[in-house]
Structures are given as C-alpha cells and as structure tokens.
Image (spheres, rainbow, N blue to C red):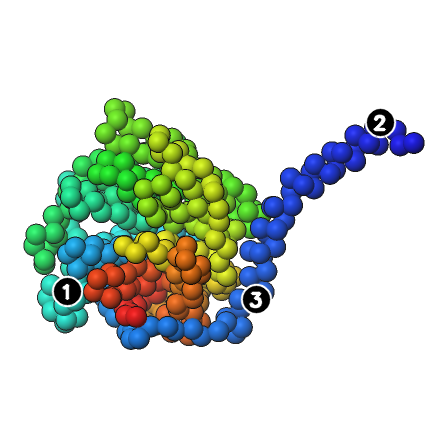
Amino acid sequence: MPSVRILSQLAFAVVLIAWSLPWFQGRKHALTLLAKNKPENLPEINTFSSYSHKLINKVRNCEDGIIIEEDGFAILSCDSGRDLWNTVMGTFYPQRSLIPNGKLWVYRYEEADDSESSLAPIEFVDYPGDFSFHPLGVEYHRKTGTLLVCNHHLAGSRVDVFTLDVSSKNTPVAKHTRTVLHPLIRTPNSIALLSGTEFYVTNDHYIRRRDSPLGALAETYLGIPGGSVAYVNLAAEPVEVRTVARAPFANGVAVLNESTVAVAATSSAEVRLFDRLADNSLVQTGAILVPFLPDNLSTNKDGSLLIAGHPHPPTLDKLVKHRRTCISEEDGTVAQECWKSTSPTWVSRWTAEKGLENLYVSSKEFGSGATAAKDADRNVGIITGLYENGILVWKE
C-alpha cells in the first residue's frame, strides 16, 4: 500500500494542480494571442457607416478620451512627451528638461474642424511647484466641474484634481485644487467617478518599471495580479484610499450601472465584472474574454460597454523602441515622419444581451487604439491612439 507520505504528496499535487488550472487557462488565452494576432494575420473589420481620421498634426499620443454628451464635446488626454517619458512602457529619457508636457484638449466634435472653437487646449492654473504633466486616464464630473487626471509626473505618479471651467470655448481653464499622493496609488492608470468626491482608480502594476524593469515585465507576462483598484474618497479627512480589488495589469475601469463595475485585466485579455458593495468594495462575479489585450473602457446610456485595446503587444513594444530612435539628441524632439502608429487597433462592444461584437479591427489605418467612446444621442464616436497622430471619429 502507498505510504502516508506518498498519499500526502499526491494530495498536495492534486490541490496545487486544481489551484493552478485557472491560471494556466488564463495564460493560455492571453499568450495564444501573441501568435494569432500578428498584424499580417489580423482581419480588417469596419462596421462604421462613416469614419475619418481627424486632428492630424494637432493632437497626438492620446491615451484617453471621454465624451460629455450633455455639452457635445470630448476631453482628450494627449502627451507628445510620451515618446520620451512613459512609466508604463518603460521609457525614461535622461534629459528631463527636454521632455515636453502633455495636454488636455476640449474637442467639440459637432463643429467644423477648421473653426476656432472646435479644438482648444485646457489652460492649467495654480499648479504648485514645477508643472509636470503626463496624463493618462481622465474623468469629469459635470455638475461640480471636478476634473480628475492620472498624472505620471516626473517626480512621481499621482492623481491631480482640478476645477474645470469650459464657459469660454477658446480658453477652457482648469484650476488645481489638490494632489492625491498615496502608497496605494502607485501606478495610476484609469479613473471611474462615483460622485464629485468619490472614484475608483486602477493601478496597472505593483512593480513599477522605474524600480525593476524585469520585475514589471514578469508581472505583465506571467499574469501576476499585482494591479489593483483603489477606492478614493476626497471628502474624508484625511483622504480615504483603500484597495478594493486586484487584477493582472488593471487598466481601464468603468461603472456599468449602480451595482456593476468593469475592469480591464490587460494581461489576461479579459474584462472582469465586479459587484459594487455598500462600502464600495468590489467582488468579482464574472469576466468577458476578448480577442485582444484591453486598454480603456467606456459605457453608453444603453448599458453597452466599449472596449479598445491592442491585438499584438510585441508590435506595440517594437513601435515604442522605434520611437526612441526618432528622438533628436540635440533637443529631444521627434520628427513628424515618426508620429504615425504602426501598431494595430481592436475595438469591441459588449452587452449582456448580445455579448461581444467587433466594431473595428485594423493593422493599416488607425494604430495603437487605447480608448473608444460614443455620444449615443448624436451618433458620434471617437477612438484615441496611444502613439497615433490625431484621432478617429466615427458614426454607426
């Protein structure tokens, strides 16, 4: 008969295999995409009734974009300095004085592109100390005018809070009101508002690229759930910050309804669904597998979820490395011929009724898609590109 020791070892092995099986299945799905989604293998899908590549040579490297339907404008989070400073992808240009700041833009998409008020940069005032601005996720609470920005400041990532005045179309102004620096906000990426003073913010990694490049890559490709979702309450004194969920490479976050929150788990190629509890803690209830690595999320009035992301991470990595070779040693500028993205884009829509629908897939037209958002009433949508020149504007 087998000894007690052998039986114990077998029992341990069974438990270990059972515990590891979901992890192996998740890694299989995500890693399969590295071979399946090579640009030359991707289908070209376009379900839009019309679309156009706009704001070329006016905005570039736009990571996030949110639509304010009531007023018919979008806020674009763009950073020409991303070619020199990207804490997520590991770009840290040593001559910091040459790194240009990013900008937020108000884009009034119903106005003619050549009108003076169709596109205006937001002016920032009362920012304490040296102004360092490298924005990723943004959110806007229209009723209070509160503007929140994930800012990968050269001195350390944080969430900056502003009051935005858009009464002047040509010169919207954002007044700085506070900065949230906290140990539980290590790598802020995306924000979802709950009220004028409460929000969720994702941290894409626990291991920061600036601290350990190899460790951060291991966290990404092994699917280690070092990313997190933090709940923040600005009305509390001191500011309340607590971790309420974890996910591998926690990226975009969106509130689907009063009880459900969606989080893009980029490393797992899925969007995780969470129940929101009375204390704003989150409990995972499901997941939406997607055929690409999801970046940012947005919701529509009809309850649908727009998911944009990157089909083939190695191609995005190759693009980032190429951009570094385009940097002028003299002044840190990047030649205009390098502004075009060569990394593919994938945009899908999910609803509980229909499941996942592919709206746009391209390796040729508009690259490095990071966010898709839509004004449902006006039937106008936008796609932003992490390393793209301009944005894509579409209708269904």
The tag earlier along the polypeptide, 2 or 1, is 2
Q: Which residue is mark 3?
A: 36
User: Rounded to the nearest whole Å, what is the CA distance between mark 1 and mark 3?
Assistant: 40 Å
Pick the front one: 59 or 356: 356
At horizontal 34% and vertical 48% (from top left) the residue drawn is 256
State how far apart marks 3 and 2 are (Cα): 46 Å
Disc 1: which residue: 118
Badge 3: residue crowd in 10 Å (few <14, some 14–19, many ≥20): some
Which is more N-terminal, label 2 or label 3?
A: 2
Task: From the viewer's side, name the closer residue of 339 and 140.
Answer: 140
Q: Is residue 20 in view from this perspective?
A: yes
Residue 363, horizontal then vertical, whole percent:
44, 71
- CB within 8 Å, label 3 to label 2: no
- Mark 3 or mark 1, which is nearer the start of the sequence? 3
- Comparing 289 with 346, the one in front is 289
Pinpoint residue 66: horizontal percent, then vertical percent. 26, 54
How far from the left and from the top, in percent, is residue 264?
43, 50
Q: Is residue 46 above or below residue 387?
A: below
Residue 210 as seen in the image, left or right of residue 145? right
Q: Which residue is mark 2?
A: 4
- The kind of residue on which mark 3 rests is Lys
Going by the numbered disc 2, the residue's amino acid type is: Val
- Above/below status of 53 relative to 329: below
**Nearest to the observer: residue 379 or residue 148:** 379
Numbered disc 3: secondary structure: helix
| CB atoms of marks 2 and 1 within 8 Å | no
Residue 178, quarter of the rendered image = top left
Please name the amino acid that badge 1 sits on. Answer: Ser
Residue 303 position, x and y percent, is 33, 53
Residue 16 lies, with reference to residue 34, above or below; the image says: above
